Amino acid sequence: MPSITSSLYPQARENRLPASHPGVVKARTAFLKAAGINFILLQLLFLAVFCYAFGSLFQQTSHTHNLHIVLVDYGGGGAIGHAVRAAYASLQGPNFPSLVEHPPSDFPSTSELWDAVCQTQYSAALYVTQGASARLEAALAVQEGAIASSLYNATDVMAYIWNEAVYPQVMDASISNNIQLLSNAARVAYSTGNGTGHVRSVSGPLAVSVFAQPWKLQSINIQPTSQGSRAIYNTIVIILVLIQEFFYLGTINGLSARFKLYSRVDPYRIAVVRNINSLAYTFIGSLCVTGAIWAFRSGWAVNANQFALSWAALWLFAHANFVVLDVFTIWLSAAYVPIALVLWISLNITSILLPFPLSPAFYRVGYAFPAHAIYQVLTDIWSGGCNPQLEYALPVLFSWELAGLVFSGLGVFRRCHYATIAEERQVREFEERLDAAVALEMAKMQEAMNAARLKRGDEAKTDKEGKLRPESGSGHGVVAGRGREDEDDREAFREQLADVMERVNTRQRREQEEEGVPCSFGPSFDLPFSPRRDDETD
């Protein structure tokens, strides 16, 4: 292995300092200290993120009673209604949705129940059809062979209305499955005790079959949403949108830094171009996201109008996050930008993992995050307006958009201001280094001139006294001696110059640390496509 690495990277181990070298010891101590502190900070950060996310899901089933189902017995308190109430009494608890009964006068028809679910007044509506109890009792009392479909229809007894598009997996487990469980429990309650409405016995296989299965629960689903991709609409889709904006923001910052736009171009023009660029990018990005959702909808009943509305909503969400992330990169130190990104993603995603009734009340802070707002808007679009949360969701999105535009635009001026200061500082530092080098060279020349004057004075004095002695040795030895002296002089001058430059650099770094530049120019990434060097301005 050493021979292979040496042949591949022959200079990898050259000029290495021993582990006991003071410079290595100092660097190692500083490295271990910094690595340890960041180790602890990052562990605490992700521990907090995990705890926050898991906390929103903690004891989810014990909050199921916060989901409300309206019950209306259009049969006027018949045997089936009594069976449903008895079944709910046996199932009632923290792990079961709350059944709220209303008289038929509050909802004169099933269309009012449909509207109540559509307007999210209730998570679902369960109703018993008018005359169902009487028809069932009559069917059970009829002798064998006399039962006809016109006399009794098992599918026209009990039904429930729900909207699967609102958190599909939660609605399946907490609403649909529990209502079916309630229906099965009510069927058992009906077939035992006083639930059969004074029917003491049945005869014939047809009557027995009705007694065994008195009704078939009907599901009225406002927007069936059973495709497999529904599982990631409120998780991976939102995460990828946020990451997509962050990385393009880093690309824009990298280009701006490479072409030195902040110190050369008018800030108004920079702000306009950045917004046009970001609007175009998020416009295409939201089209791709919506297109992917539609491409894998797998028979989901959504139309072209809903596609366009979803595209527009995702565009607003994407651009709002672009400018918000840009604000983070402006006003936060570069070291804290990754932390802010992690927190921003986790807070947004946690706000849409579950409906708020199934999470602790603290997590209702998620109303303020754009991810929760966009999911409510999308759910409203996909279910044909049956999630009317737009009165707060759209203002939340536009608030983030407007605030981000204002502070992002102000941040352009901030970046231009500090970029100009940094450019002036670089020029000043270069001039200081140049002055230091010139001063050292002048001092060296002055020293040489003084030495030459002194030598000429000594030679003149020696000639006058008649004691001048010729140099001994051959001419070749004299030249060689002078060459060695010149080499020694150059080496000494380089050492002196390096010492002076190091002192200047140390002082400049100290001044920069003391002054600081309270502005971050944002994350900057290397580009897959980079402009040629001759395309850049000098």
Image (cartoon, helix red, strand yellow):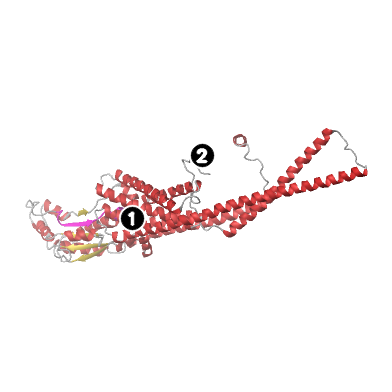
Q: Does 155 lie within the magenta span? A: yes
Quarter of the picture containing the N terminus is top right
Q: Residue at x 80, y 38 (%)?
A: 482
Counting from the top left corner in percent of width and height, residue 506 is at 64, 54
Q: Residue at x 25, y 51 (%)?
A: 224
Whether residue 55 is visible, yes or no, is yes
Mark 1–mark 2 Cα distance, whole angstroms, equals 44 Å
Whether residue 353 is visible, yes or no, is no
Task: Give the amino acid at mark 1.
Answer: Ile
Q: Where is mark 1, residue-wise?
A: 374
Q: Residue at x 47, y 43 (%)?
A: 527
Q: Where is mark 2, residue-wise?
A: 534
| Highlighted magenta segment, given as a residue range | 154-170
| Dot 2 crowding, Cα within 10 Å, few <14, some 14–19, many 20+ | few
Q: Residue at x 28, y 48 (%)?
A: 307
Q: Quadrant of residue 87?
A: bottom left
Please state if 235 lies on the left or on the right of 480 as rendered.
left
Counting from the top left corner in percent of width and height, residue 264 is at 49, 50
SS at mark 1? Answer: helix
Mark nearer the viewer, 1 or 2: 2
Counting from the top left corner in percent of width and height, residue 429 is at 61, 52
Q: Nearer the viewer, residue 18 or 442?
A: 442
Q: Nearer the viewer, residue 343 or 444?
A: 444
Taking the view exactly as shown, the residue that stands out farthest to the right is: 466
Q: Nearer the viewer, residue 63 or 246?
A: 246
Q: Earlier in the sequence, mark 1 or mark 2?
A: 1
Q: Quadrant of residue 397?
A: bottom left
Counting from the top left corner in percent of width and height, residue 347 is at 41, 58
| Dot 1 crowding, Cα within 10 Å, few <14, some 14–19, many 20+ | many
Task: Give the amino acid at mark 2.
Answer: Asp
Q: Nearer the viewer, residue 358 or 509?
A: 509
